[in-house]
Structure formats: structure tokens, C-alpha cells
Amino acid sequence: MDYETIRYDGTDGVLIITLNRPDKLNAFNEQMIQETIAAFKQAGRDDHVRCVVLTGAGRGFSSGQDLKGFEERGEEVSIGEHLRQGYNRLIMRMVTLEKPIIGAINGVAAGAGCGVALACDIRIASDQASFMQAFSKVGLIPDSGSTWMLPQLIGYARAYEMAITAEKVTADKALAWGLVNEVVPAAQLDEIVAAWAQRLAQGPTLAFGLTKRAMRRASGMGLEEALAYEAMLQEVAGRSHDHREGVAAFLEKRAPEYRGD
Ligand code: LHQ
């Protein structure tokens, strides 16, 4: 599939999706929202893809909704419908993709761009990155999953602070708050993310995917239900090639060779 607003580059089990409207700090217009949804759908269907990296071209990760583009669509556009047809589908595609997604946060992640960053499973941030719940600057509430994901990640008080101040949270503060997994020098971001992605792409993809499903679902469950759900998914993982291979490799004192199934 040909994309115009994103780049879609895959090698050795790693797919890199690059938001590619650098002049606008990768603000999402309608085409970029739909192309990013399509890219994650394609990633889900392609068995060669075992890890996805999401990043931005230029100095931004994403500045959120393209406010100029949205304004030009006129007064009668329903924001609710725009979310339902766009960002909500994108966020659901990301969280239901049963492969790890690494957010390589190269610069500012604002508004819906912050929501999309939060929907990644792991965030590696450049020391130049920042996170901004920009919505209240334009009189809106956090969307794209931010009201759900942000309090879970950093707690209600910090999440609410980010929402009502709309101030940039620096990479270092994001690390201290548990918003990112690692902060790295900007010049080394690509290299360090590539090492992470290679490692994950050589891992037991089925187990990584089921782990994501179990953890995402567990947040809506009590312990008893979560235990039952874990047992059900472990039954599936336990029948996989990679489980047998992992145990055999351990017993034979060698490195495992996972296939992803
Ligand atoms: C932009 C944008 C942008 C267009 C930078 N749009 N051009 C959902 C549904 C429906 C409606 C509304 O929203 C939503 C969800 C949302 O995402 S709401 C939140 C939308 N985003 C924002 O409010 C952030 C707006 N941007 C900013 O505050 C700044 O650009 C940040 C703090 C992100 C970066 O600041 P700087 O590093 O100083 O860069 P800059 O402001 O100079 O931006 C560079 C260029 O990118 C500039 O264009 P220009 O032609 O002047 O060089 C900006 O106009 C353009 N740009 N964000 N969201």
C-alpha cells in the first residue's frame, strides 16, 4: 500500500512507521489519521512484522490534530464523529495489535499526538522530547485515550495537572513520573530504539502479544477474573512452538531461536 503522509519501512521483523508531516511537527490531518490506522492494520496482518516502532520525522513526534486543517473543514464538523471515525479507531488498532509497539519519541508529543504516544507499549524518549496535554489550550478535554491511559500511567493528580496546565513535561520529568521507559541522547535515539526493536522482534511474539492482551484487559477486571483469564491465555502460550523452544534451549544451555508462533 502506498502512503503519502507516513513512511512504512520494514526489515528483519521490525516495522518502522514514521509520521511524516515535519513542517507541521507531524500534526494529524484526516489523511494521516486514516493512513496510520491502515498501517497498523497492515502490521497486524503481516506475520513478518514482529515489532513496530512509531516515530516522527523532523523535530517533532506529533503536535496532535492539525488545527488549521480542522478549522478549514468548517463549523458544522462534529468533533465527536471526527474522534469516533479517526483517533478512537487508531488507538484501538494500536492497543489490540498483538505485537509490541515502541514509541520512539523524538520531539514534542502534543494533544492527540500525546494520546498516540501513550498508546505505544514502550516509550523511548530523546532528551529533546516533551509531552503536552495541549487540549485545554484550545478549550477541549483530553482525547485519544488520554483520560484513560494517563491517570493509569502517572496517577490522577499528575494527569489532571498536565490536562489543566497544558504545559510541556520534559523527558526527564516524564521518566521520573513513569511516562517513559528510558531517556536517551537525541543523537542515539535511532540506534538505541533499533537495538530494542531487534531484540523484541526476535522474541516469542505470540507470548508478547498475549501478554499485552492480558495486561490491557486486566485493568477492567478483579483479581479472580484476571487469574482465570491468565490461565486461559497461558494455555494458548503453552501450546506454542516458542514455549517448547524456550524450555529446550534452557535445558540444552543454548540461546533460543524463536519463530514468533
Ligand atoms: C501546527 C500544529 C497543529 C497545525 C504545530 N496544527 N499546525 C481532536 C479533534 C478535533 C479538533 C481538535 O483537536 C483534537 C485533538 C487535539 O489534538 S487538540 C490539540 C492540538 N494541538 C495543539 O494545540 C498543539 C499546537 N501546537 C503547539 O502548541 C506548538 O506548535 C508546539 C508546542 C507543539 C511546538 O511549538 P514550537 O516548537 O514552538 O513549534 P511551532 O509552534 O513554531 O510549530 C512549527 C510549525 O508547525 C508552525 O508552522 P509555521 O508555518 O508557522 O512554521 C505551526 O503552526 C505548525 N503546527 N502544531 N497542531
Image: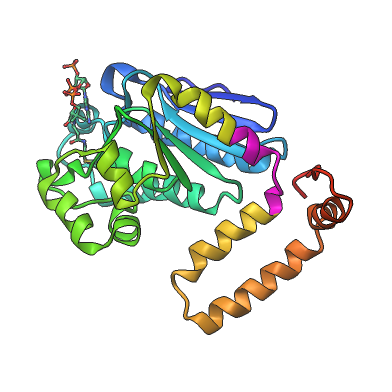
Q: Is residue 259 above or below residue 218?
A: above
| In the image, residue 204 lies in the stretch drawn in magenta | yes
Image-quadrant location for residue 199:
top right
Q: Is residue 212 above or below residue 254?
A: below
| In the image, residue 55 lies in the stretch drawn in magenta | no
Residue at the extreme bottom: 224
Of residues 4 and 151, the one nearer the viewer is: 151
In the visual, does 257 lie left or right of 199? Answer: right
Image point (63%, 41%), residue name? 200
Image point (37%, 47%), residue name? 118
Residue 163 in the image, given as x and y percentages of width and height: 17, 51
Q: In which quarter of the image is ligand 1?
A: top left
Assign the magenta stretch its main secondary structure.
helix
Image-quadrant location for residue 100:
top right
Residue 241 in the image, given as x and y percentages of width and height: 83, 53
Of residues 14 and 200, the one nearer the viewer is: 200
Residue 160 in the image, given as x and y percentages of width and height: 18, 57
For the question of whether residue 182 can be seen, the reply is yes
Residue extent of the magenta highlight: 197-206
